[in-house]
């Protein structure tokens, strides 16, 4: 009887130690997972923002269509300008003036070859840009675009791209931690519970909430 009691006590102690270990280790593992996955999401959402800004520079609007954005990156060009001679080169400037030329030359460059420089993205990278990292291409960023009228009656294009925490974090393993994180962001910091840039409510220069 005494031996059985000792075994039961040992089992209780082991279970108690395991519960304490989980209570201590789970929040730490969650923070590490949140940091790692958020970094991957931020890296990709920055590329999306870069592409949207380039699209706007050509069309004076943003797009909410992933296929349109991918086609723009892969197949279109941007018009650029460069100086023909240095502004301090008086002889060169005089020659241009004599020839009736301006000190500006326009040229075109492929979108994919310039906007992400020095980083190089492949066609596969571009086609997968819509997918939130770590989701095995199952979850897409939420992308919206449109126009708003400011208080001074100016119509401006706006865009918003976001990835909620619940779309790229493990909601089974870290269910309570995610609930706490979302509640903290929304109710204590008035912050979007995830990664995002831009706003459909106001022009904010496509600011990212990770830059706060």
Image: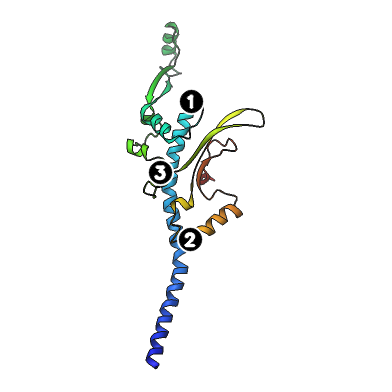
User: In the figure, 107 relative to 69: above or below?
Assistant: above
Where residue 15 sits, quadrant-wise, is bottom left
Question: Is residue 194 at least partly visible in the picture?
Answer: yes
| Residue of label 1 | 59
Label 1: few (<14), some (14–19) or many (≥20) C-alpha neighbours in 10 Å: few
Per the image, the residue denoted by label 2 is 175
Measured from the top left, where is residue 173 in percent x and y?
43, 61
In the foreground, 201 or 116:
201
Q: Position of residue 123 (x, y in %)?
A: 33, 35
Q: Are marks 1 and 3 in contact (CB under 8 Å)?
A: no
State the residue at coordinates (39%, 30%): 71
SS type, badge 1: helix
Question: Could you tell which of marks 1 and 3 lies nearer the N-terminus?
Answer: 1
Residue 115: which disc?
A: none
Residue at (62% x, 27% y) in the render: 154
Q: Secondary structure at mark 2?
A: helix
Residue receiving disc 3: 131
Instruction: Identify the residue shown where x is 54% and y is 55%.
Output: 182
């Amino acid at each position: 009887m005494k031996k059985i009691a000792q075994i039961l006590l040992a089992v209780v102690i082991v279970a108690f130690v395991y519960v304490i270990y989980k209570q201590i280790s789970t929040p730490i593992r969650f923070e590490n997972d949140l940091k790692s996955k958020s970094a991957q999401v931020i890296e990709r959402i920055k590329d999306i923002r870069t592409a949207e800004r380039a699209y706007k520079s050509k069309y004076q609007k943003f797009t909410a269509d992933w296929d349109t954005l991918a086609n723009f990156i892969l197949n279109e060009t941007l018009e650029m300008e460069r100086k023909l001679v240095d502004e301090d080169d008086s002889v060169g400037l005089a020659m241009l003036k004599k020839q009736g030329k301006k000190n500006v030359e326009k040229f075109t460059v492929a979108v994919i070859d310039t906007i992400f420089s020095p980083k190089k993205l492949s066609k596969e990278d571009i086609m997968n840009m819509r997918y939130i990292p770590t989701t095995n291409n199952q979850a897409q960023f939420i992308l919206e675009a449109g126009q708003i009228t400011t208080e001074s009656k100016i119509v401006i294009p706006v865009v918003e791209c976001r990835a909620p925490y619940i779309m790229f974090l493990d909601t089974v393993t870290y269910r309570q931690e995610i609930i706490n994180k979302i509640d903290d962001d929304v109710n204590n910091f008035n912050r979007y519970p995830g990664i995002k840039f831009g706003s459909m409510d106001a022009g904010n220069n496509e600011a990212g909430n990770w830059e706060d």
